[in-house]
Image (spheres, rainbow, N blue to C red):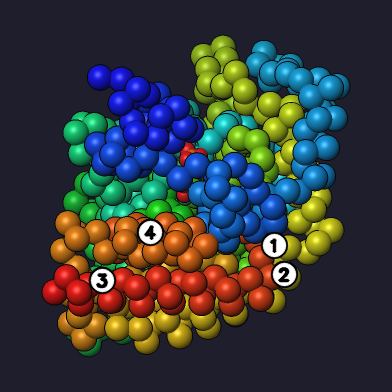
Amino acid sequence: MNNVTTDPRGNSAASRDIAFAIHPYTNLKTHLANGPLVITRGEGVHVYDEEGKQYIEGMAGLWCTALGYNENRLVEAAMKAMRRLPYYHQFGGKAHDTGIDLAEQLIGMAPVPMSKVFFANSGSEANDTAMKLVWYYWNAMGKPEKKKIISRIKAYHGVTIASASLTGLPNNHRDFDLPIARVLHTDCPQYYRFGQEGESEEAFASRLADNLEKLIQREGPETIGAFFAEPVMGAGGVIVPPATYFDKIQPILKKHDILFVVDEVICGFGRTGNMFGTQTYNLQPDMISIAKNLSSAYLPISALMINERVFQGMVQESEKIGTFGHGFTYSGHPVAAAVALETLKIYAERDIVSHVRKVAPRLQSGLLKLADHPLVGEARGIGLLGGLELVKNKKTRESFDPKHMVGAYVAKRTEAHGLIVRAIGDTVAICPPLIIEEVQISQLIERLGRALDDTAAWLSHNG
Ligand SMILES: Cc1ncc(COP(=O)(O)O)c(C=O)c1O
């Protein structure tokens, strides 16, 4: 059957979408019945649907449109670059000035000493590359057994075969036959869910560090090549690490000579109130993956920053083999690189980090107020990143039955009130463009509150 002709909406954008498009992270079956929300334009922190309805984009798209939806300087930068050199690559020692400028700029602003930048097009590719480099590096070091990688339950590092393996979420593994071998997952650092009765945040962090040490000992420290972590876990449910967590994890990595890869795909470029989450949590990574806010998502570009230690291993290995056999056609695409350069220039000129620090308290205090709502078990967040975990019982923290899709209902109701958020199970994620103003944050909180009230009414109506 062809939905174009059978759909009562006729030849609308929605019916053509149902007919032809596959949507990531969508229940493909229910989408056939429900169809999409079709967004047609954007302005500032707002987007508009095909009926002209305005929404605050409370998720900055997918945690990425830092500068909002009509930053003309980025458009101009793209057009200029497109006219001058629409494409060139970086293979075989070729280069273009935009790629060189961007690499230099990123090394200059790296939160810890970094040596080189490798460009890719998505967060998944950057993390995939990091994983390959871990293996390449340990081969260079003559330790071919040091290849296992530890990630964390509820981590999100992407969806390619390697990065989806690093991701610690069941839906990214189930029936995709993942994770691949040599990827291990240690505890999720979510105090609200996994802290024990009477256990302090610090004691929880100590227990997790202890568990990590035990895992490493069980597997054999000589077999563990790297540890991957987001400073704040995003797509796993906006999980802010408990106090002292990274202070306790990092010495264990050092002790066993385990490389540390920090995934700054969400946290990078101001989100947590510092330029990088690495600074917020005092991290000492060997590699840092970045994407999303790097170009404010106006064009796809990602990168992996690599320290001198890992780079020296790569040099050695490529000399032995004859080439560094990795790279993407669009690595460092000159138009995307030009947009990223302009994005970084705007962040500096407008002091985006100070702006985030100025307005973030409005978001965090607003979310904390919503924590009093009967449906909210925990409000958490940092900077311009927040999450509300919905619970059936505030006291016992009992969750709703997932089949009732309470989080999804809240997200639907926020849409009705002109706000786009994301339901991650029963955690509502909020991650607005970094340019958001306090008055707009207040609107966001108010609309979210109304959606929670609607949901409470719906729940009580349905028993
Ligand atoms: C922390 C983190 N890493 C990696 C990725 C994957 O990025 P992409 O979707 O660009 O492959 C994401 C995407 O949301 C992310 O949040």
Residue on which the image places disc 2: 355
- Which is more N-terminal, label 2 or label 1? 2
- 175 or 310, nearer to the observer: 175
Secondary structure under the numbered disc 4 in the rendered image = helix
Res 271 → quadrant:
bottom right
- 164 or 243, nearer to the observer: 164
Callout 1 touching callout 2 (CB < 8 Å): yes
Residue positioned 81% across, 50% down in the render: 345
Res 41 → quadrant:
top right
Residue 337 pos. (x, y %) = 72, 34
- Which is more N-terminal, label 4 or label 2? 2
Residue 370 appears left or right of 28: right
Residue on which the image places disc 4: 412
Residue 369 appears left or right of 188: right
Separation of residues labelled 1 and 2 (CA atoms): 8 Å
Callout 1 touching callout 4 (CB < 8 Å): no
Residue 218 pos. (x, y %) = 19, 51
Secondary structure under the numbered disc 3 in the rendered image = helix
Label 2 crowd bin: few (<14), some (14–19), many (20+), radius 10 Å: some
Residue 307 appears left or right of 16: right
Which amino acid type corresponds to the residue marked 3 in the rendered image? Trp
Which amino acid type corresponds to the residue marked 4 in the rendered image? Lys
Report the number of numbered marks. 4
Label 4 crowd bin: few (<14), some (14–19), many (20+), radius 10 Å: some
Residue positioned 58% across, 73% down in the render: 443
- Which is more N-terminal, label 2 or label 3? 2
**Which of the labelled discs sits on residue 435, or is there none?**
1
Residue on which the image places disc 3: 458
Separation of residues labelled 1 and 3 (CA atoms): 34 Å
- Which is more N-terminal, label 3 or label 1? 1
